[in-house]
Amino acid sequence: MRSQTKRHLTPHELDVLLRTSVGIGCRLEDELTDGWFNTAYRVVLDDGRPAVVKLAPPPDVEVLRYERGIMETEAMVYRRIAALPGNGVPTPALLYAGREFLVLSPLDGTPWDKTAALLSPTAEAALRRELGAITARLHTLAPEDGRFGYPAAASALSAPDWRTAFTAMVEALLEDAERRRSPLGPPPVAIRTAVAEGGYALDEVTEPRLVHFDLWPGNVFVAPTGQGEHRITGLIDHERAFWGDPAAELVSLAFGGDTGPDSDLVAGYTGAGGSLDFTPALRHRLALYHLYLGLLLVVECGPRGYGPDHLAFCRRLLTGALDRLRALR
């Protein structure tokens, strides 16, 4: 598997990029290889600070429509989180930002997916409640212009109402799929019909909030605090964020565990002031968001260079979401 979007620089090229852009050079230590879209390097800056440098894809590489300008989105999210009163959303500090890179502070701890096997059920439940509370605080962030959709100016996928924005987001992925000849499985007309039939539920969302939309355990860092307990030390990879329905967050959060009304995550979310009322309309929207994520994951398999097993997994997600939506008719 080889990603078509990752940009690789030599240690000298990376040093020159930072030195000429923000006035400080670096010494490259190693590449962080978990991601499949951006390239990330662990470095030591000239002043001795450890940091992570995140590089956008090369400018001549074709990306999906929603991915246009998403490094700008990530920088915006870091700045907005830093300005939250009392903060309460742990995340790396944005040290420097350029058009094609971010320089971030490193996080303590380990990605949750790499330490999950060591967590007791009690520790896991406590972390899920903490993650719910952090997510509720993240969802207090709202767009300054009141628009829904992707915030990057380059994306052009935003609208004054959620139904229009979400429909445009789905349509952009379908256009990407057609251009890249992605093996979706379900016909595009079935996806478009499902979105149109859910319009009444989408119209219930009238206040846009920041949705990370990629809070699977690999993007949540945790660290031990002693006596078998752990804490969350930070959320990473905010580039996929959009302004939309907070309930859409449950889709990626479900990769880490239960997100139902009686779950630890929802208890933490509502305990921190978040609101989730599992009405039939909300459940309908959740099925639409599962459809959207499944579609996104299938389409990105090509440019990410994922193998057939991962593609099959993503197609099952897409087909399963469409089946659930058909059952709602």
Image: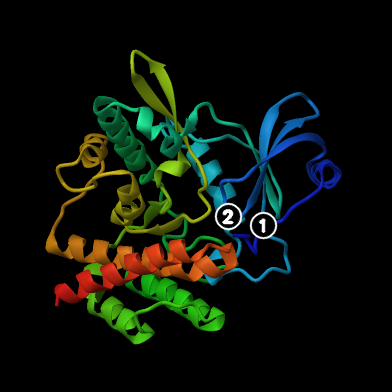
Foreground of the two, 126 or 89: 126
Quadrant of res 50? top right
- Residue pushed farthest bottom? 189
Q: Is residue 302 above or below residue 36?
A: below
Q: Which residue position holds label 2?
A: 36
- Give the mark nearest the N terminus, 2 or 1: 1
- Label 2 neighbour load within 10 Å: few <14, some 14-19, many 20+: some
Say which quadrant the N terminus sits in.
bottom right
Q: Is residue 303 above or below residue 50?
A: below
Q: Residue at x 36, y 46 (%)?
A: 139
Q: Is residue 250 above or below residue 42?
A: below
Q: Residue at x 46, y 60 (%)?
A: 145
Query: Which amino acid is tagged 2?
Result: Trp
SS class, disc 1? loop
Q: Which residue position holds label 1?
A: 6
Foreground of the two, 191 or 95: 191
**Looking at the picture, how far across and down is residue 256, in whole percent?**
33, 44
**Looking at the picture, how far across and down is residue 21, in whole percent?**
80, 46
Label 2 close to label 1 by CB (< 8 Å): yes
Query: Which amino acid is tagged 1?
Result: Lys
User: What is the C-alpha distance between the residues marked 2 and 1?
Assistant: 7 Å
